[in-house]
Amino acid sequence: MHSSLLSRGVLNLGLALVLVGGLCLVGWTCAEGTARSLGLDVWNLPRVLRDEAHSSRAMRAAEAAKVEMAYVSEVREEVLKDVLLGRLTLAEGLDRFRDLAATTPTFRRTLDGYFSHLPPEEALRTYYRRVLEDALDEYPIAVAQLRPELDDLFPAARVVKPMS
């Protein structure tokens, strides 16, 4: 009988420890933010659905921005090619960039971010000038052909390095 009481006491103590441990675990899980950070707050279905909808919108916006910037890169290359081949003047190329900034919000935000210290038109002109500088570094023969127009379009800035 003594061992039966001892066994029952040990069993009760074990169950009590499991119960207390389980309650501690539930309390810890339900603590502010812990359940959510572990993804265990499924009882808060409206919040889970809002978070999922927000994530989906953010992913769609990121994808749209990626598509817009790919379009900007395509237009930039096309404008550079047309300027270098003489199919567009530098001023016409700048107009194409103006149109691009007006119709592509991601590009406009990028310009405003990189050149936040400049007014929007000056930011666009600075970007265009840098794009031209990079292209003309690769095609120095175009510098001599475009020099007069470069000096007219960007009088305050030396656009390209002098030919050596």
Image (spheres, rainbow, N blue to C red):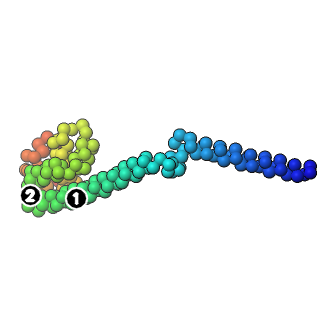
Q: Amino acid at mark 1?
A: Tyr
Taking depth in this image into account, of 137 and 114 the one nearest to the observer is 114
Q: Secondary structure at mark 1?
A: helix
The residue carrying mark 2 is: 88
Mark 1, residue position: 71
For the residue pair 81 and 40, the one nearer the viewer reads as 40
Helix, strand or loop at disc 2?
loop
Residue 26 lies, in percent from the top left, at: 61, 45
Q: Which mark is residue 34?
A: none
> Residues under labels 2 and 1: Cα distance?
19 Å
Please identify the quadrant where the C terminus is shown.
bottom left
Precedes in sequence: disc 2 or disc 1: 1
Q: For the residue marked with disc 2, what is the amino acid?
A: Leu
Comparing 38 with 103, the one in front is 38
Q: Would residue 102 be visible to someone looking at this image?
A: yes
Report the label total: 2
Relative to residue 139, is residue 32 depicted above or below? above
